[in-house]
Amino acid sequence: MSTPLAASLLVALAAANPTLSKAEATLSFARFGEPVASHSLEELQIAVGAELARVHEPYEDRPVEFAALPLPELFDAIYSPSWRRERDLHVLFTCADGYQPTVPLSRFLDHASWLAFERLGAAEFAIDKLESGRRQTVSLGPFYVVWDNAENEELRSEGDYGWPYQVVAVDLVRTAERFPHMVPPPASSDRVRDGFAAFQVHCSRCHAVNGDGGRIGPELMTSPSSILLRGRPWLRRWIEDPSSELPAARMPRFNPEAPNREATIEAIIDYLYAMAEAAPGTSGAR
């Protein structure tokens, strides 16, 4: 749900987040890796106008209100409305901390979404997030992608998928072209390909495979044989809930509300095995 904000809220970023000046709140846009534009918050507000976004905050599990820019209208202004005919593309978000999630472009056509820049009723543009077994205050600036999930069970069940914060850049990409070293071998089974699709949703935002992906977590193919040596039972336990193996693990447990959770985890393991077995100098059995 959204309603127009009062004009006074359109210039409230500096007050809402004293560590980030208005001039510093900029966002870069690209298409297939080629720069398209770079705009300040003020310029983006002029282009599309701000709204009140009421959402169910997935990290805090409660209703929260943000001052935000509607993302479909923002994409119209940056890429022209032609982006709406390219449902096969993905949106790659780059965050200040190295997080690099990709979200299908079709999701922005099917569900309302916003680019938040202020948390209303709060002193800071931040959330309290569970990390390494304890709640920590995490800054969201300069931008935070939020979704109209307050009354949408499908989006609520996906947890924090598609909710990147500290966003500094947006790129429209074809994942196979942007991340060629992450793609499974051509002869891979449907199950491995399903695992690859799930890996992009749940894992590649933090982890890289052969250099492609996020930078928060470790590269998974630094030592491909280690994946094979650890074995499926250990990988399953780690993906399901890392704290069962390492109590202070920063990596969160696999979304408990995810549809077909167990089958999805198994498909991700199949994908990791396929990538490890395809790496030079490795071999192993399932």
Image (cartoon, helix red, strand yellow):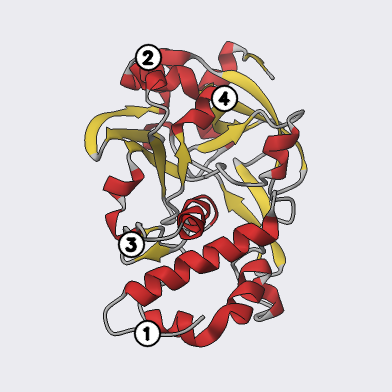
Residue at 51 percent of width and 23 percent of height: 109
Horizontally, is 8 left or right of 39 in the view? right
Residue at 61 percent of width and 45 percent of height: 126
Judging by the rendered image, the residue that carries numbered circle 2 is: 81
Judging by the rendered image, the residue that carries numbered circle 3 is: 185
Q: How many numbered marks appear?
A: 4
Find the distance from the CA under tag 1 to the CA under tag 2: 48 Å
Q: Amino acid at mark 2?
A: Pro
Q: Is residue 196 above or below residue 13?
A: below
Judging by the rendered image, the residue that carries numbered circle 1 is: 283
Report if residue 272 is visible in the image: yes
Horizontally, is 212 left or right of 105 in the view? left
Judging by the rendered image, the residue that carries numbered circle 4 is: 110
Tell me which label, 4 or 2, sits earlier in the chain. Answer: 2
Residue at 57 percent of width and 12 percent of height: 7
Label 3 Cα neighbours within 10 Å, binned few <14 / some 14-19 / many ≥20: some
Q: Amino acid at mark 1?
A: Ser
Q: Amino acid at mark 4?
A: Asp
Q: Position of residue 282 (x, y in %)?
A: 34, 84
